[in-house]
Amino acid sequence: LLPSAEAPRSAATLTTWTYGQDNSGTRNLLGTIKSLDQLGPISLNCTENANVTVHQERLHCAWGLISRDGWALLDDADSPVLDPKSGWWGIGNNTDAVDTYFFGHGLDYRAALADYVLIGGKAAMVPRYALGVWWSRWQNLGNRDTRKIVEAYSSRDLPLDVFILDMDWHTKNAWGGYTIDRSLFPYPADSFGWIHSKGLALAGNLHDDTGLNNWEETWDACCAKLGVNPNTTKTIPFSMTDETYSLAVEDIALKSLETTHNMSDFWWIDYQQGGTQGNCTGGKMNPTIWTDKLRCTDKIRRGEDDRAMVLARWGGMGNHRYQVGFSGDVAGLSWENLAFQPYFSLTSANVGYGYWSHDLV
């Protein structure tokens, strides 16, 4: 970086950036935060919300890459370091004193975002069904219930493209799990195959922080992958820094649901248990961005050619590559909260993250 840089001129009055200045106090057009869990309309100014904590985690607030001053900064100094051989993380954070990207595009906002994509990567195109009509409720739905709902839409000639199963699809041994509740879906491949036969995509809700447990259908296979005795071990703790653990979840527990049981076309990652769980250091190294990455790139890693996506909270800069946000459980149903959500989606596009799904309650 040069000691000072003047943003390209335009019709508006722009300002000169001098080394040492940051985004605070500028006319930055703002970016986004992790979610709207337990929140109503909130300032997206990262200085003003710096001390807000939800679910034992700060908001991962990011400034927009565009500003009416004509320049914006991206501070990458404390991002996680990836292992150069495996591409995995868990070896610490970047310790450079300064690692700053300067976006001096004047008011050419499209150019600023285009340049960000050059260093941050492109957002994958979502499957076509993602732009259609979705259905989800937090209810203890079973085979008969799901059929009634789908048939109700069909009988009224109402469009329906995606059916989402909230967390009650799995056994109730813990808040999370990877085993289908057979009291609800005694023949899951038949139940979920029927939904697919109606032209619908299907997704399931996940809470990963409870780890792998001995009641899981794939317990023995996961233990074999991890070199653990399944007869003497009850729980394998959630760990996002352990590549073997993470791939056991992806390629055994979840893959079995996707193939053997014909379940999910994508996953709704409902992680909300804190930024330091799973041996993460917190901040930019958090479980949200890594579970998002895994489930949006599993198909690439496996050599599958269908388009992938996730529905999940935002884990920080770079999460635009894992495309669809879930803004969480807002503080309450009000016109004020509903009015804020389109604004929230719009400013998120200023960090390349333009897709959000918003809960009403």
Image (cartoon, helix red, strand yellow):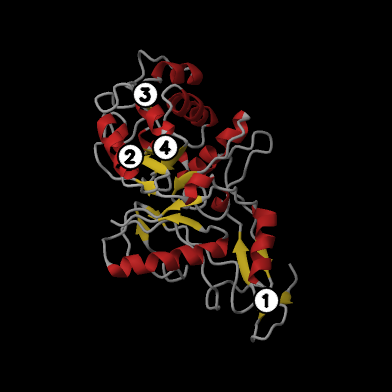
Nearer to us of marks 1 and 2 is 2
Mark 4 vs 1, N-terminal side: 1
Mark 3: amino acid: Asp
Residue 311 image position (x, y, % from top left) = 45, 46
Residue 150 is tagged as: 2
Mark 3 vs 2, N-terminal side: 2
Nearer to us of marks 1 and 3 is 3
- Neighbor class of circle 1 (other Cα within 10 Å; few <14, some 14-19, many 20+) is many
Residue 289 image position (x, y, % from top left) = 50, 47
Q: Looking at the image, which is closer to me, 7 or 337? A: 337
Q: Calculate the distance from the C-alpha at mark 3 to the C-alpha at mark 4.
A: 13 Å
Mark 4 vs 2, N-terminal side: 2
Residue 30 image position (x, y, % from top left) = 51, 69
Q: Quadrant of the C terminus?
A: bottom left
291 left or right, relative to 178 = right
Residue on which the image places disc 4: 202
Residue 243 image position (x, y, % from top left) = 54, 31
Q: Secondary structure at mark 4?
A: strand
Nearer to us of marks 4 and 1 is 4
Mark 1: amino acid: Gly
